Image: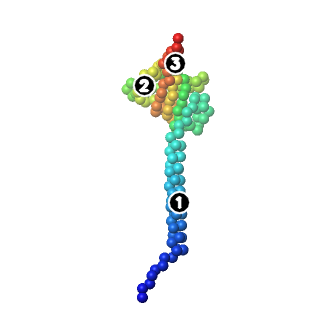
């Protein structure tokens, strides 16, 4: 005698429900991992933008952290070594001074610049090791007023 198999409706419904939960949990885990990686990458690439007063107030906590500093340039302190391509200068704001060392090509407007934006890390010795510098020039590059 042949028997006909009748599907178990209760078992099929529970399998479908369990599959939905597994899919939902897996999707949430993937979204959580993506969110975690995104947040961590933003935090590791975040750079503080400070002036000398702010840097001096937070000096101990900013050692060996990526920082961007904007300060007036002391033009008399500029020293450049052609052989090692090492540029040394001082950023000065009132009575605050920060020695900066940069290795690379000197910007053409370095001796004409009013202020410098330096990006790099503050060493424990108090010397700022710049990886990038941007010279802000005086207003002579602005357009002349209409007559």
Spot occupied by residue 118 in the image (x, y as percentages of width and height) = 50, 30
Give the residue at x 49% y 21%: 137
Label ID, residue 43:
none
Spot occupied by residue 133 in the image (x, y as percentages of width and height) = 47, 29
**Number of residues whose C-alpha sits closer than 10 Å to that of mark 2, classed few (under 14), some (14–19) or many (20 or more):** some
Please identify the residue farthest to the bottom as the structure is shown.
Answer: 1
N-terminal-most mark, 3 or 1 = 1
In this view, 35 is above or below 133? below
Q: How far apart are the two marked residues, 2 and 3, measured between alpha carbons?
A: 21 Å
Q: What is the total number of numbered labels drawn onto the structure image? A: 3
Closer-to-camera residue (1/28): 1
Residue, disc 1: 24
Q: In the drawing, does residue 34 fall left or right of residue 1?
A: right
Q: Say which of marks 2 and 3 sits in front.
A: 3
Q: Say which of marks 2 and 1 sits in front.
A: 1
**What sort of colour scheme is used for the picture?**
rainbow
Please identify the residue farthest to the top as the structure is shown.
Answer: 147
Q: Mark yes or no: residue 124 visible.
A: no
Residue, disc 2: 106
Q: Say which of marks 3 and 1 sits in front.
A: 1
Secondary structure found at label 3:
helix
Secondary structure found at label 1:
helix
Spot occupied by residue 120 in the image (x, y as percentages of width and height) = 49, 34
Residue, disc 3: 139
Secondary structure found at label 2:
loop
**Number of residues whose C-alpha sits closer than 10 Å to that of mark 1, classed few (under 14), some (14–19) or many (20 or more):** few
């Amino acid at each position: 005698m042949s028997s006909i198999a009748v599907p178990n409706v209760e078992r099929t419904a529970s399998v479908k429900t369990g599959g939905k939960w597994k899919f939902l949990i897996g999707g949430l885990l993937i979204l959580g991992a993506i969110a975690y990686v995104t947040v961590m990458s933003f935090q590791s690439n975040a750079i503080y933008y400070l002036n000398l007063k702010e840097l001096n107030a937070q000096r101990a906590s900013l050692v060996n952290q990526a920082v961007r500093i904007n300060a007036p340039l002391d033009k008399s302190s500029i020293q450049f070594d052609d052989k090692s391509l090492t540029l040394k200068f001082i950023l000065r704001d009132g009575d605050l001074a920060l020695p900066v060392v940069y290795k690379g090509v000197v910007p053409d407007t370095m001796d004409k610049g009013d202020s410098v934006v330096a990006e790099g890390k503050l060493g424990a010795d108090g010397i700022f090791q710049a990886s990038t510098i941007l010279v802000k020039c005086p207003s002579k590059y602005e357009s002349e007023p209409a007559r």
